[in-house]
Image (cartoon, rainbow, N blue to C red):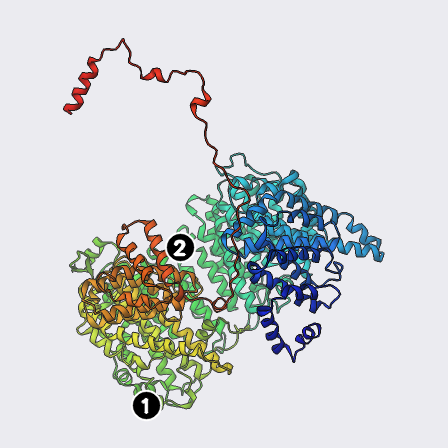
Amino acid sequence: MHSFVIKMHCESFIGKFTKICEEFKESSSNCIVYGLALAEKEHPHIIRHFGLQLLEHAVKYSWTKLKQEDKDVLKNSSLSLIAKGTNGILEEQPHIKDAISKVVVEIMKHEWPTYWQNLMTELFNLSLLGFSQKELVLKVFLRIVEDIVIFQNLNHPRRKDIANALNRHMSDLFDFFINLLQDNTEAVDTLLSVGTEEETLLAQCKLKVSEMTLMTINGYIDWVSMSHITVKDCILLQMLCLLLSHKYLQFQAAECLFAVVSRRGKIEDRTPLLVLFHEGALATIWEAAITAEKGSTNEHFYKVLQKLCQILVELGRQLCALWGNESCPEVRQPPNFEKYLKALLACTQHPSQMLSSYTLMLWSQFLRHNEVSNDEHFKTILPQVMESLSKAIYKVGYPSQTNSPSCNYARLDFDSDEDFALFFSRFRSECSGVMRQATLMIPVESFELASKRLKLLLSKPVENGEESVNSASPLYLEWEALTVYIECVMSRLNLDNQTEDIMNDGVCLLKNALLYESQDPLILSNLLSCISALFVFLKYTPTSLSDILKKIFSMVVFNFPGQTKSTRCKSVKNLRQHACSVLVKLCILYPDFMFPVFDDLFQHIQQISSDPELLSQMEKHILVEALIIVSNHFNNYEKQSVFLEEVLKPCKEFWSSEEFRIAFSSADKFMSYIGLDQAAVEPSSADTCGIHRSRISLCVNVILGVIKRSKWPDDVETAKAGGFVTGQSPSGDYIMRNPAAVHITSMLENLLAALKSMNMLHCKEYIKLRHPDFSKAYDLPDSDIYMLLGTSATSGDNVNTSSCSQPLKRMKHFLTIHYDVCGHILGNSAQFLGHDFYSIPNLAQTIIQTALSCLDILPDYRLRSVIRIILKAIILHCPTEFYVSVVLPILSHVCPFMLNRLGTKWQIIQSRSAEKRDEDEEETQEVLEEQFTRQLTRDYLELLGVICFSTKGSVIKEEMDEDDDIPQQPQAKELGNLGKLCMKYDNICEALILTVFSGLNWLDTVACLKFSAMAMPLLKQLIMEKQVPENAVCHIYESILIALQTHGHHDASQAALLILGLQTYELLLPRYPGLRSIMLLVPNCSEPALKAFEDKLMNSQPNMKTADKKKKESYKKLVSEIIGKYIGQRFRREIRYKTLPNMFLRQKLSKPLLDDLEKEDIGLCGLFEPDPCIKSEPCIKSEQRMQSV
């Protein structure tokens, strides 16, 4: 056996001999004998480990079959292994120690405490034999608590018995832990300083035991009673605080202390934790943090520093829970609270952004806490917190850079710049949240800091030029961080409650910012953001409006000498578009200021738009949006309509031209017009197809901007006076007309033709016409690929490089954006044009023949746009009177198609799951396809929610985020009006029912949960509306059972499907008794059990929670054999633990009789004797009155 086990670990024999060894474990009756023989310490550690595995296997799976003599042998032998079965604590292999503790713990799980009552005494005695025995005993205590509390890998009765037994011995256990910690930490430093070999070995042994003791304590702290942790005047907490300064044990001690301060439970039980605010404890933590900070570039000390910071944070959270709580009226401001806040501030100010991020949630909690936020010490330190956070948001610390001390710590926390970028985005967002909250408390100090920092930057000279500043320049980083800070402060600054000094300072600051000059686009962009944030002071200086507009328009036309529209660098383009967007913001926030200068604004925009080389198409349409926003304040339908006609005139000339009509008439004409069937051409005046694409982009963006920005007045009376109201709907709502409707509806014909042509591009005959240079023009955009794969593109500092991309990328970008914008025009027309849109003759048939044509050849990412952008908006905003004429024809076309499309896709995915793929490229493509199928399914699910459950003006909104483990479900008891109407039409009804019940089996847990929420309302309506054949009902019920097998391993899905299955069986069984035959096909579902279950169903009282729970449990037992399990649990061998008899039986104490307690007459009988002084006549009269009543 010895040589056999040695061979087993040779690489050439491992497969064969592992199988033999496993068979030996299962079949041999001598596992105990061989195990004990092989476990002797004279053997090599490989042999010993296999012997201990044999013992563990015998205890786990054969304990109930063993004779009592063998059980006693194993008990004694397991303790003997602890006593003398190992080498010294420093020499023994860790896996041998773990294996021995496993054997003891497995026996405990079967026998203790009932049949092994002296175990604790024996373990305590064994710990006296030496360091190795101490460590093994501690491992036993740690492993048993892990199994019953953390992993819970045994049945509930045994787990409860062992937990109760541990609780009975908890005082002894903690005394044991504390004594071990005291004995083995004292004089360790002295022994190490002596330097002799003997003393060094002794110190190492003590450290090993101390480390194991701390690990064991950590396993108990989270769930034991607080009285054990605070025993002996909190000696354990004192020791943990002292060990924080111990070089070799500080991290383990910090973990234990962190577990203590992180405890949850009853509020009053946590009061003793405030002892850590006392001078000694807080000083010890602070000194340990200072020591760790000095060596924090070392990973060990950095981890210690992080853990100490987390201790301070958790201590603060405990204070928030206790201070001001009614259960703890005695808790007030803790001692040394000022020192605590300074320590917390030091963590916030640390160069490590990760360390600083630990404190942000606590600062936010303090700001929201009634008692803490009103504390004088907190108010004093809050300005320092604001200043620290304003510096913490500097975008530095990338692991690949060296421009900040933060980079050294980032290399310890992150593997790549991409990981850091994701973290920093969240970190800055949290910092911004705290700064906004703090501004509400200290508005004056917050604004003064912003004013001081901005004035300082405005006074700094700037080197102008194309290459003067980049995104890593210190000046840019300072500007960018200040921009974030000012936006946070100004968004929460209530000027109505501020002094005149603040107003004057703000006005002065705005004017100084307007006077600042620079030729660097990055600096100007941040300056523009600061000016935008300071718009709140505009009402105190209305005369500055002209200066603001001049500044904005100077940036709208900003350009470097020699650059043209086609060669502008990215930073310049960003600045110009930013300036246009700021103008839109100004028009939205201050229309009363902008409306008087509307004519001047309109003329200036027309003037700069007349030069074809000055503004890009994007800039033009953003400026047009600003004009439309201001024009809405005419509050006059005719005036607004005339203005919009003028705005749309240049666009309409192009859009309605014969040139565009021919280009959109067919796919091949469209390809020729945009250059898809021609060789790629670089941007130049010779690129006529590029000019065509530019014109199309301008037109669709202007049309979309007009639709979204043009609106009728919010006030009904104003709308009536302005001529916007045309009547009332059957439901009594006023019918409004959009001033853009008459102009936009006439342009929809070409738009729908363009959508049809783009759909037809995917036909085989037109794909052949595509030029080889654009063979990948229809592929998925890279940004979407990165999003689906959960990765990010590596992006460098390219702000000043030319943005002129390759012709293929430009074409792909145009096709993607143009399709989405056309879809948005159609969807927003439904939302903003209202009745004018839905009243278009033959609207449904036109949309089906154009925008919804060729759906079967569209790729998934295009189909997603159709569902999310077009269909959802048209259905959601459709007035009730147009359901029959518009929505139902569209659904008759879409729903059967989507059933077929999704069903085919998921069938392919399910067939792939059983196959192996070796090629990485093929696997990546399959992952993309599967992810897009999931996204398409969820988008269609959201559309189904709109169809089935939404009503006009309200809709069930759900997050379809893949990261949500258990998304919220719509709890609709019945369908909406549109849903009920759809169930009356056979083709729509059939498609909806089959989609929902087939979707239960698709390999998407999120989709399964949402389908299960929709299923019952649809099924009830189906039964109510139609006479459903029995085979269809059986198919529906089979789908639910199959879904249980597919998704049963997911707890949320299992619960939802069990409820659905039970409700479906209960609803349909009286009308369709054939369902019984399906239930009887379930393994181990017998006729008597099913009959008993059905009797419970029929006899149960409705609307009883207890009855529903029992029905669900009974139903789960019937179908338990088909409920799916994780693959790791399907063939898992069950470990059987017998329930042991209770050691302590509770006896009910019988209360003594009153006759036994009172021997003398206490007058009870006298209470019932008649009183001779009272006549009986009134009693008779009262009896007569009662009888008459």
Task: Give the residue displayed 44% in from the left and 86% down from the top.
Answer: 682
Evaluate whether residue 516 shows in this view.
yes
The residue sitting at the left extreme is 1188
Can you tell which of label 2 and label 1 is closer to the viewer? 1
Q: Describe the element under mark 1 as helix, strand or loop.
A: helix
Rendered residue at 35%/88% (across/down): 767
What residue type is disc 1 on? Answer: Glu
**Count of marks overlaid on the render:** 2
Residue for point 27% across, 9% down: 1172
Q: Secondary structure at mark 2?
A: helix
Q: Hey, which quadrant is residue 956 in on the image?
A: bottom left
Is any part of residue 868 visible from this angle? no
Evaluate if marks 2 and 1 touch, with contact meaning CB atoms under 8 Å apart: no
Q: Toward the viewer: 816 or 538?
A: 816
> Of marks 2 and 1, which one's residue comes earlier in the chain?
2
| Crowd around label 1: few <14 · some 14–19 · many ≥20 (10 Å) | few
**Image: 161 above or below 934:** above
In the image, taking residue 339 as reference, residue 246 lies left or right, namely right
* Residue at the spot of label 1: 765
Q: For residue 141, which numbered disc appears in the image?
A: none
Q: Relative to the observer, which residue lies in front, 179 or 147?
A: 147
Amino acid of disc 2: Thr
With respect to residue 978, does 663 lie above or below?
A: below
Q: Position of residue 72 (x, y in %)?
A: 64, 55
Q: Which residue is mark 2?
A: 543
Please give left or right for residue 112 compared with residue 585 in the image.
right
Q: Is residue 359 above or below residue 962?
A: above
Of 623 and 887, the residue lying toward us:
887
Q: Tell me how far mark 2 sits from mark 1, CA to CA.
A: 63 Å
Give percent across and percent down for residue 927: 45, 76
